[in-house]
Image: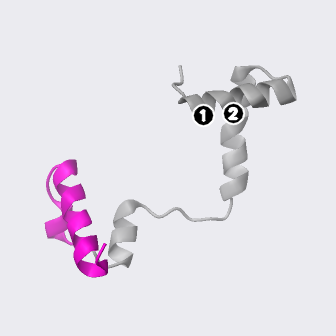
Amino acid sequence: MVRLNDDAEAKLAALRKQTGLSDSNVLKRGPDALAKETRGQSVEMPYEVFRRVQLASNENAAGSAAEVKARIANAIKNKYGR
């Protein structure tokens, strides 16, 4: 079972109507479409992004998810004034 928000449900219904495919067949094509779209692209993990912008440190990366999120937000604010 897949849970979709209202926007995704509307897109699914439109694709079903446009293609004549079942919900299941439309959804099964999603991974293939994403694989084609991202072929040859590398995906950065969050830590890699933080390291690239020099926000990651052992201090920022340790603790619960909520604590880490707050520390990273604070680091961004301090570094970029946002």
Q: Is residue 23 magenta?
A: no
Is residue 61 among the parts visible in the rendering? yes
CB of mark 1 within 8 Å of CB of mark 2? yes
Under mark 1, the amino acid is Asp
Compared with residue 1, is residue 78 higher up or lower down, i.e. above or below? below
Residue at 71% across, 22% down: 23
Residue at 28% across, 72% down: 76
Residue at 62% across, 65% down: 41
Is residue 56 among the parts visible in the rendering? no
Q: Is 9 placed left or right of 22 in the picture?
A: left
Q: Which residues are magenta?
A: 57-82
Q: Which residue is mark 1?
A: 7
Crowding near pointer 1: few (<14 within 10 Å), some, many (20+)? Answer: few
**In front here: 46 or 10?**
10
How far apart marks 1 and 2 lie (CA) works out to 6 Å
Q: Residue 15 appears at what percent x and percent y?
A: 77, 31
Q: Is 55 placed left or right of 17 in the picture?
A: left
Q: Main secondary structure of the magenta part?
A: helix
Residue at 69% across, 29% down: 12
